Amino acid sequence: MLPLRLGKDNTVNIGAVQFVNNGRDTRMDIGGGVVNLTGTLIKLDDNATESGAYLVAAKSADGTFTADTDNAVTIKDSVICGGADAMVFGGKIDMTNSYINVDKTTGAALLAAGSKIVYAGDDASDVTVTASDGNTLTVSGMYDLSKVVSNLKPATLHADRLFLLGGKISLTNAGIATDDSSTAGRESSQLLVFAGNDVHIAGGSDKHIGLMTYTGTDANSVALDNTKITGSYHSINLGGGQLNLLKSSVESTNTVGGSKDYDDPCVEFHALNGYKDKGFQSGSKNQVTMDNSSITTTGQDGQEIDIIAGAVTLKNGSVLTSRDIELAAVGSGISSGNENDNVLTMSGNTTANAIKIADSKLTVTGSNATTLNLEGGLINITGTSKVEAPVIYAAAGQTIKQETKEAANTNPTYTYTVTGRTTTDPQITREKTATVTGIVHTYGEDAIKVVDTTPTPTPTPTPTPTPTPTHADPDASTGNQQGYAGKCQ
């Protein structure tokens, strides 16, 4: 995009117009202080290597984009599809009942809402976003694709490499997926969603683009409400100051393992206030909450599930199913003890740094199923929850040191060292109504403590007998009776 100096009054409004191009490289650049698309179709060539669409609402755009929250991109009832990439930048982004699809497997879709966006790569390989929680990225609803092709289902975002960044991110009634051309998955396919004050991602088309540095607060939230993520993403990473899922799901069919060029396949949820040099910083306000929501990975070489936050809550029928699951609720953060990351220290834990599994289900399963690891200041399994894995590690305390030992053709084993209790009460508990199945190793307690929270019935009080009335002897004489009787004579 050419250098621009813009104001919020420099508005671009595009209505029910069709831009269709086939057979050649074409870049569609739309820029202004405000950009509005309503009922618009932008169709670019699927096979062209340099084709793409850029939508920018900013004060200035010259490699670095600067914007106020007035610099908004609004996409309503519109379609952007084809091409090698799609980029949407603004102080705010609001996408409603619309569809963005990048068909190229090496291309990328990037939506970024911030006050400053530094974009250093043509494929989203190096992006830094500075934002506040006022720089919102809102995606709601799906586009009815049957209007275009009769057998297509409604959808919102389709891209093998999809990145959503902002100060605050909300996905409501949305559908996100890979392009579905490979049910097994590709090493390069990934989804990254992060809300923060400063977010820096980097990588390349030949390796995963990952989080490099991060700062944020609990106001920098990511919220999914009735939203589905499907397909075969090799890497799924959602995070912010808080991460909340309500009636939402992640379902992955990826069966492709890791390699020297790509990380191991993983679904990662994070709630944190800082990240730098492989170290996570978090506090009790940095919470991951799953409410009637699920993560399911079906591939035998598919993703493990990792959830790291200041506190982790699963409730109301939430479900995790994978070959490997780890939940960590930590106080001041997690630091790596060596370059191989096989020694991790989780410090500053208190009772506020709790893992709470309420009326939910965790299952480690599959022919290559490994372990379930739970680490925090407290671990509580309540209600009708069911927790099942071949091997379960549960560690609770002020400081937790985890050492991983790996050997060829065998599952990894773990050794924990716990220093300091967070409470004199039991740190690892299970209500009698919940079940835990597997070989269990506990640290910080000698076992999972079974507690009975059934209220003790209050005994019905015995009624106090009504006293029998006492009647005076009619022949008895008292001063008052004599006096009164004398007046009646």
Image (spheres, grey):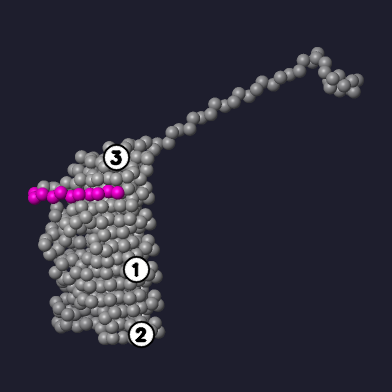
State which quadrant residue 168 falls in.
bottom left
Mark 1 is surrounded, within 10 Å at the Cα level, by few (under 14), some (14 to 19) or many (20 or more) other residues, namely: many
Task: Give the mark nearest the N terminus, 2 or 1.
Answer: 2
| Closer-to-camera residue (103/209) | 209
Q: Say what amino acid the circle numbered 2 marks.
A: Leu
350 or 180, nearer to the observer? 350
Residue 183 image position (x, y, % from top left): 15, 61
Mark 3 residue element = loop
Callout 3 amino acid: Glu
* Residues at marks 2 and 1, CA–CA distance in whole angstroms: 24 Å
Residue at image mark 3: 445
The residue stretch that appears in magenta: 399-409
Q: Is residue 320 above or below residue 48?
A: above
- The residue nearer to you, when weighing 405 against 147, is 405
Earlier in the chain: of badge 1 and badge 3, it is 1
Camera sees residue 289: no
| Tag nearer the camera, 1 or 3 | 3
Query: Which of the numbered marks, if any, corresponds to residue 418?
Result: none
Q: Secondary structure at mark 1?
A: loop
**What whole-number distance in Å separates the C-alpha atoms at marks 2 and 3?**
62 Å
Residue labelled with disc 2:
6
Mark 1 to mark 3 CA distance (whole Å): 39 Å
What number of labels is visible?
Answer: 3
- The residue at the far left in this view is 408
Residue 459 location (% of width, % of height): 49, 30
Q: Which residue is disc 1 drawn over? A: 197
Q: Amino acid at mark 1?
A: Asn
